[in-house]
Image (cartoon, grey):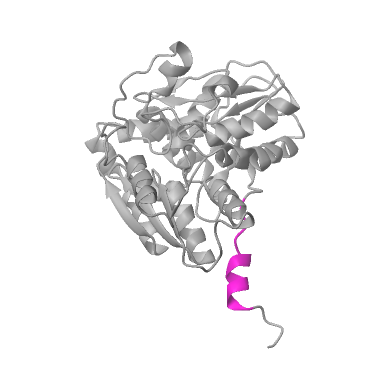
Amino acid sequence: ENSALPMVAVLVAWISVGNTPLLDLSALAPDLPKGVRVLGKAEFSNPSGSVKDRIVEYILDEQERIGRLTRFSGQTIVASSSGNTATSLAMFSALRGYRCIAITNRGTSKEKVQQLYAYGAEVVVTASGVPTDSPVHYQNVEKQLVEENPGYFGLNQYDSPLNPEAYYATLGPELWAQTNGKITHLVAAGSTGGTVSGTARFLKKKNQAIQVIMPDPHGSIFYDWWAHRKLVKPTSFEVEGVGKDSIPQALDLSLIDVMPRFSDEQAFATCRTIARRMGMMVGGSAGGNVHAALTLARKLKGPATVVAILCDSGTKYLSKIFNDEWMASKGYDVAAMDASAANRSAQ
């Protein structure tokens, strides 16, 4: 009928970023002190399956507002990413008529790489574990492409102030409203640092007493820089999307109150427990956050409301975290992990 929306309008209208559910995870720890709750912000329910939809939408909206980008122009946008930001950009590029070049490395799960191809992105997969000054480091490949092609727009997620600004404008207010201002602890690991920095800045503006916990995987350089102002050499770790080999400008460490360390095994065991006990699949970064949140919550006195960010969907890691053969190849005792999950379920 004549009243039907044009197809382009229909496609763009289906995207709804943010206002994600806040889920009660307290049942994961039956021994929590009275009055202490652990909640999870279900960022995996964003359209591309991760929290990164927030920054991509925010950055594109701002660049379109100032005239740097124009929808359906075919302009090229470049993003270096451990997978989720690039996936979000690929999705938005398909919707808004941009050409997307996504740069990631070999450590990224094959599900996330396939998602990039599915949205029509041009994908560059670089070596993993290379020094930060290497020309093939995925962040440097983005910079080089943008420098060599003046018409390209680089998302620059690691250093753009629009990254934390996006979370200050969206995720922070949502958490404050959904907890009726009762949030006492925010648990959010960092990679670009935008999620934890922007959200923390908003929440601390509302209540300076709110504690910000940024779990960091063993092998990342964040902890030593935060605790000792010491730059150490990164070592390998398997969890994706958190931890880093350099200090991004989007990360404001002055907002961090506590930085517990966690292992790949702790994160992955928590992911598998959440799947078996809560019926939802989350990625390793969410596993690290929930592990840290539960550990912290057991030591608190109520009333306390601990909110962990559930950064992305576990369906992005079917070949890794939820693949028994891959887990065993990395030396993890899958049978013990799953038996532990079942035992806790019986409590």
Asked whether residue 31 appears in the rendered view, the answer is no
Q: Position of residue 61 (x, y in %)?
A: 61, 54
- Kindly identify the residue that appears in the image at 51 percent across and 47 percent down: 50
As drawn, which residue projects farthest toward the bottom?
1
Give the quarter of the image for residue 233.
top left
Q: Position of residue 332 (x, y in %)?
A: 29, 32
- Kindly identify the residue that appears in the image at 34 percent across and 24 percent down: 219
Q: Is residue 154 above or below residue 117?
A: above
Q: Position of residue 286 (x, y in %)?
A: 49, 37
Tell me where the magenta segment starts and ends, as one range: 6-17
Q: Position of residue 60 (x, y in %)?
A: 56, 54
The image shows a total of numbered marks equal to: 0
Left or right relative to 30: residue 82: left
Left or right relative to 43: residue 157: left
Left or right relative to 87: residue 213: right
Instruction: Reply yes or no: does residue 134 show up in magenta.
Output: no
Q: Nearest the camera: 153 or 116?
A: 153
Q: Is residue 133 above or below residue 52?
A: above
Give the quarter of the image for residue 3.
bottom right
Quarter of the figure with the N terminus:
bottom right
Q: Nearest the camera: 97 or 292?
A: 97
Q: Is residue 256 above or below residue 310?
A: above
Asked whether residue 330 appears in the rendered view, the answer is yes
As drawn, which residue projects farthest toward the top?
228
Instruction: Reply yes or no: does residue 11 show up in magenta.
Output: yes
- Kindly identify the residue that appears in the image at 58 percent across and 44 percent down: 42
As drawn, which residue projects farthest toward the right?
180
